[in-house]
Image: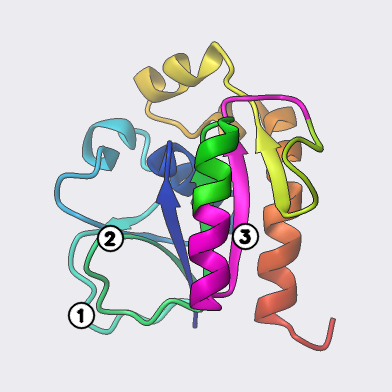
Amino acid sequence: MLAVGVEGFGRHFVAWNLAALLKAPIYADRQAPYRSWNTAGAVTVFERWEGKKYPAVIVDNRDPVIPIDMWFWVLPPDPKEVELVRERLDNTGANAHLVLNGIRQKGLFGERILASIPWEEQQAQAILMGMPLVALVPPFSSYFKPLLEVVSRVSDPGR
């Protein structure tokens, strides 16, 4: 099983949409917003893990019982914040990838940024409809393509 951790600015939104694209469950804290967001049931959400078997799981839990294989650190488009997280991750050696949230521009802040996911007005509509935005507006999933490619490489190292 591949455990993908999501941390940072807008992590719930990124985790929910990534889980929908991967058809993976989310293991989340009780206070995570999925209970109210996920009313259409597009994503399976667990608050207790108890040895469930899935090929992949998105971990949005501050105290995970599952060892994390890789991380997506979601950041606001703020150069100071990006630099702080870069330094912290460089010192840990974690298998982590940086994702900007809330901006459409690509290539900001150097090569270490894996993807930029823009803020879209339809995000609020998706939450009100209980569906991840990638399900409501399929072209939005193109912003997640770099994340999906990394997950694919980690889950199938021979690729």
Q: Kindly report which numbered mark, 3 or 2, lies closer to the viewer in this rendering.
A: 3
Q: Residue 67 appears in which quarter of the rendering?
A: bottom left
Would residue 91 be counted in the magenta stretch? yes
- Local crowd size for mark 2, using a 10 Å CA cut-off: few (<14), some (14–19), many (≥20): some
Residue 141 appearing in the image: no
Q: Quadrant of residue 58?
A: bottom left
129 lies left or right of 99: left
Q: How far apart are marks 1 and 3 (CA)?
A: 28 Å
**Res 79 label:** none
Percent of width and height locating residue 22? 59, 58
With respect to residue 101, does 46 lie above or below?
below
Marks counted in the figure total: 3
CA separation in Å, label 1 and label 2: 14 Å
**Front position in the image: 11 or 19:** 11
* Structural crowding at the residue carrying mark 3, measured as other residues with C-alpha within 10 Å and reported as few (<14), some (14–19) or many (≥20): some
Q: Which sits in the foreground, 154 or 81?
A: 81
Residue 118, by quadrant, is top right
- Within the magenta stretch, is there residue 109? no
Question: What kind of residue is marked 3?
Answer: His
Which residue, given by chain and number where applicable, does mark 1 sit on?
50
**Residue at the limit of the structure toward the left, as seen here:** 30
Q: Is mark 1 on a helix, strand or loop?
A: loop
Indicate whether 83 appears above or below 92: above
- Callout 1–callout 2 Cβ contact below 8 Å: no
112 above or below 42? below
The kind of residue tagged 2 is: Asn
Which residue is depicted at the point 57% across and 21% down? 119
Q: Position of residue 97 (x, y in %)?
A: 62, 60
Which is more N-terminal, label 2 or label 3?
A: 2
Furthest-bottom residue in view? 158
Identify residue for label 2.
61
User: Which residue lies at the image location 66% right of the left edge and 67% below the top edge?
Assistant: 151
